[in-house]
Image: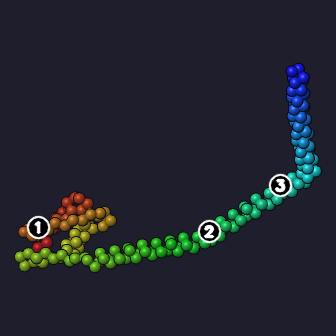
Amino acid sequence: MEDNNKQTKRRKTTTKEKADNLLKHAEDLGNHVVKGVSDFVDKNITPETIEKVKKEGKEFIDTAKSTAKTAAKKAKEVSDPVIDAASKTVKKVTADVKKTATANKAAIKPELYIQSLGNEISEDTLVEKFKEIWLKDHNISEIKDLKIYYKVEEGIAYFVVNGELTTPISLF
């Protein structure tokens, strides 16, 4: 049995030695690879290579900046006429709308005539008589709101300017 144990120990030792040798070989191989990479970097990555990469990188960045500026300029060249045209169109449409609104107001302006006991007076005449009296002491620009109340039974027009009653005017 002792011989058997010695043989097992030898096998264990032999297996351990093989594992150690394999480990040593792997370390040597790893060191060799690291040395090879290191030598390659030392031989091929020189200060000139680094400068070349920096220069080409700067050229690339400069080209990108120049391209971006050119694109922005082109976009402005294309968009400015579009914006101008849109602005002109908006102004024209606004003017047309104002003209139409003014035309519609003018087209519907009624004429008011009041008849009583054989007498007749128009709204325009009432306003003209009011202006004659008003302009003696005031300016037209002071009037923001004008309301006319005509009492047929009295033959008197009452004018309310900016919410305040003014002197009544006898018309007949």
* Image coords of residue 127 (percent x, y): 22, 72
Quadrant location of the N terminus in the rendered image: top right
Please name the residue that numbered disc 3 is placed on. Answer: 54
- Considering depth in this image, is 29 or 6 the residue closer to the camera? 6
Give the amino acid type for the residue marked by disc 3 in the picture: Lys
Quote the CA–CA distance across marks 2 and 3. Answer: 33 Å
Q: Residues within 10 Å of mark 3 (few under 14, many from 20)?
A: few
* Image coords of residue 39 (percent x, y): 93, 47
- Considering depth in this image, is 92 or 114 the residue closer to the camera? 92
Q: Which mark is residue 151?
A: 1
Quote the CA–CA distance across marks 3 and 1. Answer: 97 Å
Q: Residue at x 38, y 73 (%)?
A: 98
* Local secondary structure at mark 3: helix
Give the amino acid type for the residue marked by disc 1 in the picture: Lys
Q: Earlier in the sequence, mark 2 or mark 1?
A: 2
Lateral position of residue 48 relative to residue 135, left or right: right
Q: Residue at x 89, y 26 (%)?
A: 7
| Residue 131 visible to the viewer | yes
Please name the residue that numbered disc 2 is placed on. Answer: 76
Label pair 3/1, CB-CB below 8 angstroms: no
- Considering depth in this image, is 32 or 155 the residue closer to the camera? 32
